[in-house]
Amino acid sequence: MNILYAASEAAPFIATGGLADVAGSLPKALCSQQHCCRVVIPLYSSIKPELRAKMKFLCNFYVPLGWRNQYCGVFEATQNGVKYYFIDNEYYFKRDGGIYGFYDDAERFAFFSKAICEMIQYIDFFPDILHCNDWQTAMAPVYLNMFYRDIEKYRNLKTVFTIHNIQYQGKYGMEIATDVLGLPYYAAPTLMYDGCLNMMKAAIESCNYVTTVSPTYAKEITDPWFAYGLDRLLRANQHKLTGILNGIDTDAYNPETDPALYANFNAKSLNKKAVNKVELQKSMGLAQDKDKMLIGIVTRFVAHKGIDLIQYIFEELMKRELQVVALGSGDYIFESFFQEMQAKHPGKCAVKIGFIPDLAHKIYAGADTFLMPSKSEPCGLAQMVALRYGTLPIVRETGGLKDSIVDMGDNLAGNGFTFKTYNAHDMLGAIDRAGGLYYNRPMWKKAVVKAMASDFTWDRSAGEYIDMYHRVLG
Ligand code: GLC
Protein backbone atom coordinates (compact mmCIF):
# COMPACT_ATOMS: atom_id res chain seq x y z
CA MET A 1 0.00 0.00 0.00
CA ASN A 2 1.25 3.51 -0.82
CA ILE A 3 0.54 6.25 1.70
CA LEU A 4 1.38 9.92 1.33
CA TYR A 5 1.47 11.55 4.78
CA ALA A 6 0.93 15.31 4.58
CA ALA A 7 1.71 17.57 7.51
CA SER A 8 2.83 21.12 8.23
CA GLU A 9 5.78 19.90 10.30
CA ALA A 10 7.87 16.76 10.70
CA ALA A 11 10.85 16.03 12.92
CA PRO A 12 13.76 16.35 12.53
CA PHE A 13 13.26 18.91 9.73
CA ILE A 14 10.91 21.29 11.49
CA ALA A 15 9.13 20.89 14.81
CA THR A 16 6.98 23.06 17.02
CA GLY A 17 4.86 20.38 18.68
CA GLY A 18 3.66 16.79 18.90
CA LEU A 19 2.51 16.67 15.27
CA ALA A 20 6.15 16.86 14.18
CA ASP A 21 7.02 13.86 16.35
CA VAL A 22 4.21 11.83 14.85
CA ALA A 23 5.04 12.83 11.26
CA GLY A 24 8.65 11.95 11.99
CA SER A 25 7.96 8.51 13.42
CA LEU A 26 4.66 6.97 12.27
CA PRO A 27 5.74 6.82 8.58
CA LYS A 28 8.90 4.98 9.61
CA ALA A 29 6.79 2.43 11.51
CA LEU A 30 4.45 2.00 8.52
CA CYS A 31 7.44 1.41 6.27
CA SER A 32 8.81 -1.19 8.65
CA GLN A 33 5.51 -3.08 8.26
CA GLN A 34 6.09 -3.49 4.51
CA HIS A 35 4.09 -0.50 3.32
CA CYS A 36 5.43 2.49 1.49
CA CYS A 37 4.76 5.71 3.34
CA ARG A 38 6.24 9.02 2.21
CA VAL A 39 5.87 12.42 3.82
CA VAL A 40 5.29 15.87 2.39
CA ILE A 41 5.89 19.15 4.27
CA PRO A 42 6.57 22.76 3.24
CA LEU A 43 10.15 23.80 2.58
CA TYR A 44 10.42 26.43 5.31
CA SER A 45 13.49 28.65 5.22
CA SER A 46 13.93 27.90 8.94
CA ILE A 47 14.87 24.26 8.26
CA LYS A 48 18.47 23.96 9.44
CA PRO A 49 21.15 24.20 6.72
CA GLU A 50 22.61 20.76 7.52
CA LEU A 51 19.19 19.18 6.86
CA ARG A 52 18.62 21.42 3.87
CA ALA A 53 21.92 20.17 2.45
CA LYS A 54 20.51 16.64 2.22
CA MET A 55 17.72 17.70 -0.14
CA LYS A 56 17.72 17.20 -3.89
CA PHE A 57 15.63 19.12 -6.39
CA LEU A 58 13.06 16.84 -7.99
CA CYS A 59 10.72 18.85 -10.21
CA ASN A 60 8.68 22.01 -10.50
CA PHE A 61 5.28 23.07 -11.78
CA TYR A 62 2.67 25.78 -11.23
CA VAL A 63 -0.21 25.57 -8.79
CA PRO A 64 -3.47 27.31 -9.70
CA LEU A 65 -5.02 28.97 -6.64
CA GLY A 66 -7.91 31.26 -7.52
CA TRP A 67 -6.57 33.94 -9.88
CA ARG A 68 -2.97 33.08 -8.96
CA ASN A 69 -0.66 30.66 -10.63
CA GLN A 70 2.10 30.01 -8.12
CA TYR A 71 5.48 28.44 -8.64
CA CYS A 72 6.04 25.18 -6.80
CA GLY A 73 9.31 23.32 -6.57
CA VAL A 74 9.62 19.86 -5.06
CA PHE A 75 12.72 18.71 -3.22
CA GLU A 76 13.27 15.29 -1.73
CA ALA A 77 15.39 13.75 0.99
CA THR A 78 15.54 10.41 2.75
CA GLN A 79 15.57 10.30 6.52
CA ASN A 80 15.58 7.08 8.56
CA GLY A 81 14.66 5.18 5.42
CA VAL A 82 11.58 7.34 4.74
CA LYS A 83 11.32 9.61 1.72
CA TYR A 84 10.29 13.21 2.42
CA TYR A 85 9.04 15.70 -0.15
CA PHE A 86 9.40 19.43 0.43
CA ILE A 87 7.11 21.97 -1.21
CA ASP A 88 9.14 25.00 -2.22
CA ASN A 89 7.70 28.46 -2.71
CA GLU A 90 9.71 31.27 -1.18
CA TYR A 91 6.85 33.75 -1.25
CA TYR A 92 4.94 31.54 1.20
CA PHE A 93 7.61 29.72 3.17
CA LYS A 94 10.67 31.95 3.30
CA ARG A 95 9.76 33.91 6.41
CA ASP A 96 11.38 34.96 9.64
CA GLY A 97 9.76 34.29 12.97
CA GLY A 98 8.29 30.82 13.24
CA ILE A 99 6.23 28.82 10.80
CA TYR A 100 2.70 29.87 11.78
CA GLY A 101 1.00 33.07 12.79
CA PHE A 102 1.23 35.13 9.59
CA TYR A 103 -1.57 37.27 8.22
CA ASP A 104 -1.86 35.00 5.20
CA ASP A 105 -1.71 31.56 6.87
CA ALA A 106 -4.97 30.56 5.20
CA GLU A 107 -3.45 31.25 1.79
CA ARG A 108 -0.08 29.69 2.66
CA PHE A 109 -1.58 26.40 3.71
CA ALA A 110 -4.24 26.40 1.01
CA PHE A 111 -1.34 26.66 -1.43
CA PHE A 112 0.44 23.81 0.35
CA SER A 113 -2.70 21.64 0.23
CA LYS A 114 -3.29 22.33 -3.44
CA ALA A 115 0.38 21.76 -4.23
CA ILE A 116 0.13 18.29 -2.68
CA CYS A 117 -2.78 17.47 -4.99
CA GLU A 118 -0.82 18.70 -8.00
CA MET A 119 2.45 17.10 -6.99
CA ILE A 120 1.28 13.50 -7.10
CA GLN A 121 0.91 13.59 -10.87
CA TYR A 122 4.53 14.71 -11.34
CA ILE A 123 6.42 12.35 -9.02
CA ASP A 124 7.01 8.62 -9.34
CA PHE A 125 4.79 7.82 -6.38
CA PHE A 126 1.03 7.72 -6.59
CA PRO A 127 -0.59 7.06 -3.22
CA ASP A 128 -3.53 4.79 -2.48
CA ILE A 129 -4.14 6.88 0.61
CA LEU A 130 -3.55 10.58 1.12
CA HIS A 131 -3.30 11.05 4.87
CA CYS A 132 -3.75 14.69 5.95
CA ASN A 133 -3.19 16.14 9.41
CA ASP A 134 -4.74 19.14 11.12
CA TRP A 135 -6.13 22.26 9.48
CA GLN A 136 -2.97 23.14 7.57
CA THR A 137 -3.56 20.19 5.21
CA ALA A 138 -7.34 20.10 5.57
CA MET A 139 -7.96 21.68 2.19
CA ALA A 140 -6.25 18.88 0.27
CA PRO A 141 -9.20 16.43 0.41
CA VAL A 142 -11.52 19.33 -0.44
CA TYR A 143 -9.50 20.35 -3.51
CA LEU A 144 -9.21 16.72 -4.55
CA ASN A 145 -12.95 16.27 -4.59
CA MET A 146 -13.59 19.64 -6.26
CA PHE A 147 -10.93 19.70 -8.95
CA TYR A 148 -9.15 16.38 -9.43
CA ARG A 149 -11.65 13.54 -9.37
CA ASP A 150 -12.20 13.81 -13.14
CA ILE A 151 -8.63 12.80 -13.77
CA GLU A 152 -8.52 9.01 -14.14
CA LYS A 153 -5.57 8.53 -11.80
CA TYR A 154 -7.22 10.41 -8.96
CA ARG A 155 -10.51 8.60 -9.10
CA ASN A 156 -9.75 5.94 -6.51
CA LEU A 157 -7.45 7.91 -4.28
CA LYS A 158 -8.77 7.67 -0.70
CA THR A 159 -8.27 10.31 1.96
CA VAL A 160 -7.81 10.16 5.72
CA PHE A 161 -7.80 13.16 8.01
CA THR A 162 -6.28 13.13 11.50
CA ILE A 163 -7.19 15.63 14.18
CA HIS A 164 -4.23 16.28 16.47
CA ASN A 165 -5.89 19.16 18.20
CA ILE A 166 -9.44 20.26 17.56
CA GLN A 167 -8.84 23.73 18.96
CA TYR A 168 -7.12 24.86 15.77
CA GLN A 169 -9.63 24.49 12.95
CA GLY A 170 -8.57 26.95 10.27
CA LYS A 171 -11.58 29.19 10.80
CA TYR A 172 -12.01 32.31 8.66
CA GLY A 173 -14.65 34.57 7.23
CA MET A 174 -16.50 33.19 4.22
CA GLU A 175 -15.10 36.03 2.12
CA ILE A 176 -11.81 34.20 1.62
CA ALA A 177 -13.51 31.23 -0.07
CA THR A 178 -13.33 32.43 -3.64
CA ASP A 179 -10.52 34.95 -3.73
CA VAL A 180 -8.00 33.29 -1.41
CA LEU A 181 -8.89 29.60 -1.52
CA GLY A 182 -9.96 29.67 -5.14
CA LEU A 183 -13.17 27.73 -4.57
CA PRO A 184 -16.41 28.23 -6.51
CA TYR A 185 -19.47 29.66 -4.78
CA TYR A 186 -21.16 26.24 -4.85
CA ALA A 187 -18.47 24.96 -2.46
CA ALA A 188 -19.98 27.07 0.31
CA PRO A 189 -22.00 24.26 1.94
CA THR A 190 -18.85 22.16 2.28
CA LEU A 191 -16.80 25.00 3.73
CA MET A 192 -19.28 26.65 6.00
CA TYR A 193 -19.94 25.80 9.64
CA ASP A 194 -21.70 27.97 12.18
CA GLY A 195 -21.43 30.95 9.87
CA CYS A 196 -17.67 30.70 9.32
CA LEU A 197 -15.44 29.10 6.80
CA ASN A 198 -14.01 26.12 8.65
CA MET A 199 -11.27 24.10 6.97
CA MET A 200 -11.31 21.27 9.48
CA LYS A 201 -15.05 20.88 9.02
CA ALA A 202 -14.60 20.73 5.26
CA ALA A 203 -11.93 18.03 5.62
CA ILE A 204 -14.06 15.94 7.98
CA GLU A 205 -16.87 15.95 5.45
CA SER A 206 -14.71 15.47 2.40
CA CYS A 207 -12.43 12.65 3.44
CA ASN A 208 -13.09 8.93 3.66
CA TYR A 209 -12.05 8.48 7.26
CA VAL A 210 -11.30 10.67 10.27
CA THR A 211 -8.99 9.69 13.05
CA THR A 212 -7.73 11.32 16.16
CA VAL A 213 -4.78 10.46 18.32
CA SER A 214 -6.33 8.51 21.19
CA PRO A 215 -9.52 6.46 21.72
CA THR A 216 -10.64 8.62 24.64
CA TYR A 217 -10.20 11.87 22.68
CA ALA A 218 -12.23 10.33 19.83
CA LYS A 219 -15.13 10.05 22.28
CA GLU A 220 -14.45 13.38 23.98
CA ILE A 221 -14.65 15.41 20.77
CA THR A 222 -18.25 14.36 20.26
CA ASP A 223 -18.96 16.31 23.46
CA PRO A 224 -19.33 20.11 23.40
CA TRP A 225 -16.94 20.59 26.33
CA PHE A 226 -14.02 19.34 24.24
CA ALA A 227 -15.01 20.02 20.65
CA TYR A 228 -14.72 23.80 20.19
CA GLY A 229 -18.00 23.69 18.32
CA LEU A 230 -17.38 20.65 16.12
CA ASP A 231 -19.19 18.07 18.29
CA ARG A 232 -22.37 18.18 16.21
CA LEU A 233 -20.46 17.50 13.03
CA LEU A 234 -18.42 14.72 14.62
CA ARG A 235 -21.47 13.02 16.03
CA ALA A 236 -22.93 13.03 12.53
CA ASN A 237 -19.70 11.51 11.20
CA GLN A 238 -19.09 9.03 13.99
CA HIS A 239 -19.38 6.11 11.56
CA LYS A 240 -16.04 7.15 10.08
CA LEU A 241 -14.29 8.38 13.22
CA THR A 242 -11.81 6.41 15.30
CA GLY A 243 -9.03 7.07 17.81
CA ILE A 244 -5.58 5.51 17.51
CA LEU A 245 -3.10 6.17 20.28
CA ASN A 246 0.19 7.69 19.16
CA GLY A 247 3.47 5.98 19.86
CA ILE A 248 6.87 7.56 20.37
CA ASP A 249 10.08 7.23 18.44
CA THR A 250 11.96 4.92 20.76
CA ASP A 251 15.24 5.54 18.90
CA ALA A 252 15.07 9.30 19.32
CA TYR A 253 13.90 8.93 22.92
CA ASN A 254 16.26 6.34 24.28
CA PRO A 255 17.92 7.05 27.64
CA GLU A 256 20.66 4.54 26.77
CA THR A 257 21.84 6.49 23.74
CA ASP A 258 20.32 9.99 23.97
CA PRO A 259 23.20 12.42 23.27
CA ALA A 260 21.42 15.23 25.14
CA LEU A 261 21.80 13.52 28.51
CA TYR A 262 24.54 14.15 31.05
CA ALA A 263 24.81 10.37 31.54
CA ASN A 264 23.10 7.58 29.63
CA PHE A 265 21.25 5.00 31.65
CA ASN A 266 18.77 2.16 31.69
CA ALA A 267 16.62 0.46 34.31
CA LYS A 268 19.69 -1.31 35.65
CA SER A 269 21.77 1.83 36.09
CA LEU A 270 19.44 4.24 37.83
CA ASN A 271 22.38 5.76 39.69
CA LYS A 272 23.15 7.43 36.34
CA LYS A 273 19.66 8.85 36.23
CA ALA A 274 20.59 10.54 39.51
CA VAL A 275 23.60 12.11 37.75
CA ASN A 276 21.18 13.67 35.27
CA LYS A 277 19.13 15.01 38.14
CA VAL A 278 22.00 16.69 39.95
CA GLU A 279 23.46 18.16 36.73
CA LEU A 280 20.03 19.46 35.77
CA GLN A 281 19.61 21.03 39.20
CA LYS A 282 23.02 22.64 38.83
CA SER A 283 22.39 24.04 35.36
CA MET A 284 18.97 25.38 36.31
CA GLY A 285 20.07 26.97 39.57
CA LEU A 286 18.16 24.55 41.80
CA ALA A 287 19.59 23.28 45.07
CA GLN A 288 21.64 20.17 44.26
CA ASP A 289 19.91 17.47 46.20
CA LYS A 290 19.27 14.09 44.70
CA ASP A 291 16.86 13.14 47.48
CA LYS A 292 14.28 15.87 46.89
CA MET A 293 11.46 14.98 44.55
CA LEU A 294 11.93 16.98 41.36
CA ILE A 295 8.79 17.68 39.35
CA GLY A 296 9.38 18.35 35.64
CA ILE A 297 7.08 20.34 33.37
CA VAL A 298 7.66 20.62 29.62
CA THR A 299 4.74 22.12 27.78
CA ARG A 300 3.31 24.99 25.85
CA PHE A 301 2.27 27.57 28.42
CA VAL A 302 -1.36 27.82 27.37
CA ALA A 303 -4.60 27.43 29.27
CA HIS A 304 -5.62 23.99 28.00
CA LYS A 305 -2.40 22.50 29.36
CA GLY A 306 -3.78 23.15 32.85
CA ILE A 307 -1.26 25.79 33.92
CA ASP A 308 -3.96 27.59 35.88
CA LEU A 309 -4.24 24.57 38.21
CA ILE A 310 -0.51 24.81 38.86
CA GLN A 311 -0.82 28.55 39.53
CA TYR A 312 -3.64 27.99 41.96
CA ILE A 313 -1.77 25.67 44.34
CA PHE A 314 1.80 26.77 43.69
CA GLU A 315 2.40 28.45 47.02
CA GLU A 316 1.07 25.39 48.82
CA LEU A 317 3.28 23.20 46.68
CA MET A 318 6.35 25.21 47.58
CA LYS A 319 5.78 24.47 51.26
CA ARG A 320 6.58 20.84 50.51
CA GLU A 321 10.00 19.18 50.32
CA LEU A 322 10.26 19.20 46.56
CA GLN A 323 11.45 21.15 43.53
CA VAL A 324 9.87 22.21 40.25
CA VAL A 325 11.60 22.71 36.92
CA ALA A 326 9.55 24.06 34.01
CA LEU A 327 10.34 24.54 30.32
CA GLY A 328 7.98 26.07 27.82
CA SER A 329 6.75 29.13 26.05
CA GLY A 330 3.36 30.54 25.27
CA ASP A 331 1.04 33.01 26.92
CA TYR A 332 2.82 35.90 28.59
CA ILE A 333 0.69 35.55 31.71
CA PHE A 334 1.94 31.99 32.32
CA GLU A 335 5.54 32.72 31.35
CA SER A 336 5.69 35.58 33.79
CA PHE A 337 4.00 33.49 36.48
CA PHE A 338 6.79 30.91 36.39
CA GLN A 339 9.43 33.64 36.28
CA GLU A 340 7.90 35.26 39.30
CA MET A 341 7.84 31.94 41.17
CA GLN A 342 11.47 31.33 40.28
CA ALA A 343 12.39 34.70 41.77
CA LYS A 344 10.27 34.06 44.83
CA HIS A 345 11.47 30.50 45.49
CA PRO A 346 15.11 30.44 44.42
CA GLY A 347 16.63 26.97 44.46
CA LYS A 348 13.18 25.35 44.60
CA CYS A 349 11.58 26.51 41.38
CA ALA A 350 13.36 27.08 38.07
CA VAL A 351 12.00 27.98 34.67
CA LYS A 352 13.35 28.38 31.17
CA ILE A 353 11.21 30.07 28.55
CA GLY A 354 11.48 28.60 25.06
CA PHE A 355 11.16 25.51 22.89
CA ILE A 356 14.48 23.79 23.61
CA PRO A 357 14.49 20.06 22.74
CA ASP A 358 17.92 19.51 24.30
CA LEU A 359 16.77 20.82 27.68
CA ALA A 360 13.47 18.95 27.35
CA HIS A 361 15.42 15.67 27.11
CA LYS A 362 17.48 16.65 30.14
CA ILE A 363 14.28 17.26 32.12
CA TYR A 364 12.71 13.95 31.02
CA ALA A 365 15.84 12.24 32.31
CA GLY A 366 16.61 14.31 35.39
CA ALA A 367 13.17 14.77 36.96
CA ASP A 368 11.49 12.22 39.23
CA THR A 369 7.93 13.01 38.25
CA PHE A 370 6.43 14.72 35.23
CA LEU A 371 3.35 16.91 35.61
CA MET A 372 0.67 17.16 32.88
CA PRO A 373 -2.60 18.44 34.35
CA SER A 374 -4.12 19.18 30.91
CA LYS A 375 -7.68 20.39 30.59
CA SER A 376 -7.75 18.36 27.39
CA GLU A 377 -5.00 16.35 25.73
CA PRO A 378 -5.59 14.70 22.35
CA CYS A 379 -2.76 12.27 23.02
CA GLY A 380 0.23 13.80 24.70
CA LEU A 381 3.64 12.34 23.99
CA ALA A 382 5.64 13.77 26.88
CA GLN A 383 4.10 11.39 29.42
CA MET A 384 5.24 8.44 27.31
CA VAL A 385 8.71 9.87 26.89
CA ALA A 386 8.91 10.57 30.63
CA LEU A 387 8.05 6.94 31.40
CA ARG A 388 10.78 5.73 29.12
CA TYR A 389 13.22 7.89 31.08
CA GLY A 390 12.00 6.52 34.41
CA THR A 391 10.11 9.68 35.33
CA LEU A 392 6.65 8.98 36.66
CA PRO A 393 3.83 11.02 35.13
CA ILE A 394 1.24 12.89 37.21
CA VAL A 395 -1.65 13.50 34.83
CA ARG A 396 -5.28 14.40 34.59
CA GLU A 397 -7.48 11.62 33.24
CA THR A 398 -8.28 13.08 29.85
CA GLY A 399 -7.68 12.07 26.22
CA GLY A 400 -4.48 10.19 25.57
CA LEU A 401 -3.32 10.77 29.14
CA LYS A 402 -6.16 8.55 30.28
CA ASP A 403 -5.32 5.95 27.65
CA SER A 404 -1.64 5.76 28.54
CA ILE A 405 -1.35 6.37 32.29
CA VAL A 406 -2.93 4.21 34.97
CA ASP A 407 -2.80 5.22 38.60
CA MET A 408 -0.38 3.30 40.84
CA GLY A 409 -3.06 2.57 43.40
CA ASP A 410 -1.88 0.96 46.61
CA ASN A 411 -0.02 -1.92 45.03
CA LEU A 412 2.03 -0.27 42.26
CA ALA A 413 -0.42 -1.61 39.72
CA GLY A 414 -0.12 1.37 37.39
CA ASN A 415 2.55 3.56 35.83
CA GLY A 416 1.82 7.02 37.25
CA PHE A 417 -0.50 9.16 39.33
CA THR A 418 -3.79 10.41 38.00
CA PHE A 419 -6.66 12.66 39.03
CA LYS A 420 -10.01 13.03 37.41
CA THR A 421 -11.70 16.35 38.03
CA TYR A 422 -10.19 19.57 36.70
CA ASN A 423 -9.48 20.78 40.20
CA ALA A 424 -6.23 22.13 41.61
CA HIS A 425 -6.47 20.33 44.92
CA ASP A 426 -7.23 17.01 43.25
CA MET A 427 -4.02 17.58 41.33
CA LEU A 428 -2.20 18.43 44.54
CA GLY A 429 -3.55 15.20 46.02
CA ALA A 430 -2.00 13.24 43.15
CA ILE A 431 1.31 15.10 43.63
CA ASP A 432 1.21 14.24 47.33
CA ARG A 433 0.59 10.57 46.57
CA ALA A 434 3.62 10.66 44.28
CA GLY A 435 5.57 12.35 47.08
CA GLY A 436 4.44 9.68 49.55
CA LEU A 437 5.75 6.92 47.34
CA TYR A 438 8.90 8.85 46.44
CA TYR A 439 10.15 8.89 49.99
CA ASN A 440 9.67 5.11 50.22
CA ARG A 441 12.85 4.53 48.25
CA PRO A 442 12.67 0.76 47.54
CA MET A 443 9.06 1.00 46.40
CA TRP A 444 9.82 4.04 44.23
CA LYS A 445 12.67 2.23 42.55
CA LYS A 446 10.37 -0.70 41.78
CA ALA A 447 7.81 1.68 40.29
CA VAL A 448 10.47 3.37 38.14
CA VAL A 449 11.84 0.09 36.82
CA LYS A 450 8.32 -1.00 35.94
CA ALA A 451 7.55 2.34 34.26
CA MET A 452 10.63 2.08 32.10
CA ALA A 453 9.36 -1.22 30.73
CA SER A 454 6.12 0.36 29.38
CA ASP A 455 5.74 -0.20 25.68
CA PHE A 456 4.87 2.87 23.64
CA THR A 457 6.56 1.86 20.42
CA TRP A 458 4.69 2.58 17.21
CA ASP A 459 4.34 -1.08 16.19
CA ARG A 460 0.89 -1.60 17.70
CA SER A 461 -0.52 1.75 16.56
CA ALA A 462 0.99 1.42 13.09
CA GLY A 463 -0.88 -1.89 12.83
CA GLU A 464 -4.11 -0.09 13.71
CA TYR A 465 -3.47 2.53 11.03
CA ILE A 466 -2.88 -0.19 8.47
CA ASP A 467 -6.14 -1.94 9.41
CA MET A 468 -7.95 1.38 9.07
CA TYR A 469 -6.34 2.07 5.64
CA HIS A 470 -7.45 -1.39 4.50
CA ARG A 471 -10.99 -0.68 5.63
CA VAL A 472 -10.93 2.60 3.73
CA LEU A 473 -9.64 0.94 0.58
CA GLY A 474 -12.37 -1.66 0.92
C1 GLC B 1 -1.04 17.77 19.39
C2 GLC B 1 -1.79 17.41 20.66
C3 GLC B 1 -1.05 16.35 21.48
C4 GLC B 1 -0.68 15.18 20.58
C5 GLC B 1 0.08 15.67 19.35
C6 GLC B 1 0.46 14.56 18.39
O1 GLC B 1 0.11 18.46 19.69
O2 GLC B 1 -2.02 18.56 21.45
O3 GLC B 1 -1.85 15.89 22.54
O4 GLC B 1 0.11 14.26 21.29
O5 GLC B 1 -0.69 16.60 18.64
O6 GLC B 1 -0.66 13.87 17.91
Image (cartoon, rainbow, N blue to C red):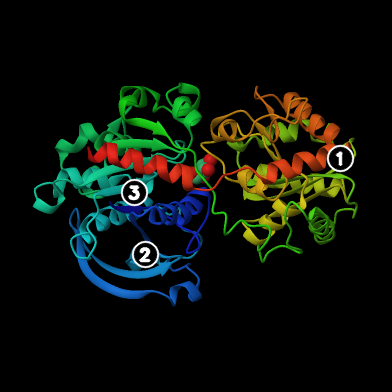
Q: Separation of disc 2 and disc 1 at Cα?
A: 47 Å
Report x, y in % for residue 268. Answer: 77, 53
Which mark sits nearer the N-terminus, 3 or 2?
A: 2
Using the rendered image of the protein, determine whether residue 428 is visible from the camera's viewpoint: yes
State the mark number for residue 137: 3
Q: Nearer the viewer, residue 455 or 307?
A: 455
- Neighbourhood count class around disc 2 (C-alpha, 10 Å): few under 14, some 14–19, many 20 upward: some
Question: Where is the C terminus found, in terms of image quarters?
Answer: top left
State the mark number for residue 405: none
State the mark number for residue 442: 1
Q: Nearer the viewer, mark 1 or mark 3?
A: 1
- Residue at screen point 44% across, 53% down: 29
Q: Nearer the viewer, residue 216 or 468?
A: 468
Using the rendered image of the protein, determine whether residue 183 is visible from the camera's viewpoint: no
User: Measured along the vertical axis of the image, is residue 61 above or below residue 108?
Assistant: below
Q: Nearer the viewer, mark 3 or mark 2?
A: 2
The amino acid type of the residue labelled 3 equals Thr
- Residue at screen point 33% across, 47% down: 131
Residue wearing tag 2: 83
Q: Separation of disc 1 and disc 3 at Cα?
A: 49 Å
The amino acid type of the residue labelled 2 equals Lys
User: Measured along the vertical axis of the image, is residue 445 above or below residue 423?
Assistant: below
| Residues tagged 2 and 1 counted as in contact (Cβ below 8 A) | no
Q: Nearer the viewer, mark 2 or mark 1?
A: 1
Residue 212 location, quadrant: top left
445 left or right of 378? Answer: right
